[in-house]
Amino acid sequence: MKRFIYVIGICSLLISINSYSEKNREAKRSVEKRILLKLNNVNFFDYDEWKVIEKKYFSLESSAARDKLAIEHFNSIYRDEVKSIAKQFELNKAVEVSVIGSILGGGLLASPIVNSLTMNATARIVGAVTTQIALPLAFMWPALELSPYTLGEHGPVSLIKDAAKSGRIKNGESFEDPYMAVYHEFAKIYLSVQKEHPDLCKKTIAMINKMRLDESENIPHYARYIETVAALPFGATPLYPNQDFLLDRLEGYSDVVANQMSSLINNFLFKNENMYLGKTYIENPYYFQGIPGSGKTYAAETIAAGFRAPFINIALDGADYNAIVGEEFSVRESRKRGRLIESMVATKPADDDVYSLNSVLFLDEFDRLLNADDYASRQVLSFMLKLLAPDHRYFYSPYLGVKIKLPQLIILAGNYEIKDDALKNRFIIMKFDGFDLDAKRSIVNRAILPKLLASTAMSIESLNDDDLAAIEQIILNNQEDLGLRSIEKDLHDYLIKKATQGKFFDLSRRRK
């Protein structure tokens, strides 16, 4: 009988320890899960909590400095919320006492049964231990189900609180928040969106809240929406022209084009100053008309580069209305954002510049829409003409669900002249007549050749006298073409052949 009681006591104690260990692990996981669920109901982007850094945020000209300030502020809000939520999981002393009391009470009820089975002192001690601790832990566990939250300084709540206080919570060392990367992306531009586009800001916050309550497989679609908002241009920054750069790059154009370009640059400078001061200055878009290779795209890129402004390039050829504006957002499948949004997002600077609306929007192949007679092209043309009206510089994005502003400087390009007088009045037209031989040599050496050498991983030092003679001959062979497109193509082919000579299979060496 004594041995039987010993065995019962030891087994009960082992069962209790194992059960406690499993329950403790489950409780820790449950705490983390319940904290995440409570975090789902927290709005980290309450303007009242962010306006304390607003003045400092907009005084920073570097996007890297803005990002750092915003993320630090978000992390401080996040840590405070986690500490507050974790604190809610702590049970008060009265609950702890009641749990302990239930254990002792259960033991007192069971001890007379064991004591009646034996009069041996040792057996009574074992019986007391068994009945007072082991058996109640094993068989009265429901009373202890919340006890892991009340383990004092060593419980999971304390660990989470300590992690929050020390800052480790943001690195996921206590538990991993699957939305942290998305939070940080939106935090970087929250104040800018709130200031410039409150409707989009409100919609994005709603999207974040929906994401946290939806199924995990839909997170990438929500994240893509939020990343799109984070990559859009907002507001205006001061831009100053690099006059030496502009004069050098625009050398070679005819006097007429040069004078028109000077007027365009001055207007862009005046427009930037007004935008930065919060004033509206809108003029008709420009239409660059000229043969392929006459320098239309090059001129637009030069203006953007001369001001260090983003250059947004969109090809209109072959696009229907949905391809331009995009499709409605869906959490179940990936949808097209549209060429306008795609190009604006893809142009976000990778350096320290703040992406702003005083950028250059270049719409190529516009004349294709004028000459096409199919329904899709007419639909796009109607949309573009409405979009380009001075009082209508925005469009509705089905993907984002709001109206989006366009950059102030808009340049369209085409090969053919606009013949409709009513349509002509909507544009400031600049005609590009092409280049003479000296201008071609100058542009090839200043712009085209360095770009092609970089694309083939070569340098100017790698060219010998024979190469320079071949380049000159390519320019001479294309004298009749007033543009630069054919010269650029022939130069590209020559440099590719030189860069790959002897490295790849050469069909010209086949047996005769």
Image (cartoon, helix red, strand yellow):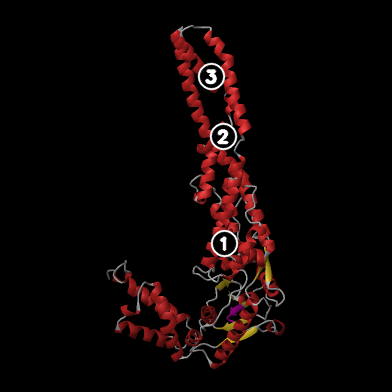
Residue type at mark 3? Gln
Q: Where is residue 135 in the image (x, y as percent from the top left)?
A: 53, 19
Q: Where is residue 54 in the image (x, y as percent from the top left)?
A: 62, 65
- Residue 73 vertical placement versus 39 (above, below): below
Which region of the structure is painted magenta? 410-415
Camera-side residue: 191 or 495?
A: 191
In the image, what residue occupies the spot 46% across and 10% down? 121
- Residue 188, label in figure: 1
The answer to which of marks 1 and 2 sits earlier in the sequence is: 2
Q: Is mark 3 on a helix, strand or loop?
A: helix
Q: Is the magenta stretch mostly helix, strand or loop?
A: strand
Q: Is mark 1 on a helix, strand or loop?
A: helix
Work out whether residue 161 can be spotted.
yes
- Residue 163, label in figure: none
Q: Where is residue 165 in the image (x, y as percent from the top left)?
A: 53, 49
Q: What element carries label 2?
A: helix
In the image, what residue occupies the spot 33% across and 72% down? 499
